[in-house]
Image: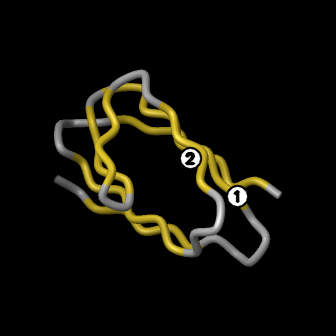
Amino acid sequence: GQVVNHQLAPNRHAWIQVARGSVVLNGENLDQGDGAAISGEFKLTVSGRKRAEILLFDLA
């Protein structure tokens, strides 16, 4: 599947929500309906396992 990389600036956090399909986020499997909070990471790598739609929030 497609791979998307996102850099987080220092002191930033993220939330990812899987609306459809399934993805791998930094080595962790997430399926439809799953969400994940990310802190302390600077690079996010999301790869699709099945056709997927995600929401990625870059937060202060």
Q: Nearer the viewer, residue 40 or 10?
A: 40
Can you tell which quarter of the image residue 54 is in? top left
Query: What residue is shown with label 2?
Result: 56
The residue at the far right in this view is 60
- Eye-nearest disc, 2 or 1: 1
Residue 36, label in figure: none
> What type is the residue that disc 2 sits on?
Leu
Vertical order, 32 against 55 (above or below): above
Give the secondary structure at mark 2. Answer: strand
The x and y percentages for residue 7 are: 56, 73
Q: Nearer the viewer, residue 36 or 22?
A: 36
Left or right of residue 24, residue 13 in this image: right
Q: Give how far apart the Cα atoms at labels 2 and 1 are.
A: 11 Å
Vertical order, 7 against 12 (above or below): below
**What residue is rendered at 76% in x and 53% in y?**
59
The residue at the far top in this view is 33
**What residue is rendered at 60% in x and 45% in y?**
37
Left or right of residue 23, residue 33 in this image: right
The x and y percentages for residue 10 are: 74, 77
> What type is the residue that disc 1 sits on?
His
Q: Residues within 10 Å of mark 1 (few under 14, many from 20)?
A: some
Left or right of residue 3, residue 16 in this image: right
Q: Are marks 2 and 1 in contact (CB under 8 Å)?
A: no
**What residue is rendered at 34% in x and 24% in y?**
32
**What residue is rendered at 30% in x and 58% in y?**
27
Give the secondary structure at mark 1. Answer: strand
The x and y percentages for residue 1 are: 16, 53
Residue 13, label in figure: 1
Label located before the other in sequence (2 or 1): 1
Left or right of residue 20, residue 34 in this image: right
Vertical order, 49 against 47 (above or below): above
Q: Residues within 10 Å of mark 2 (few under 14, many from 20)?
A: few
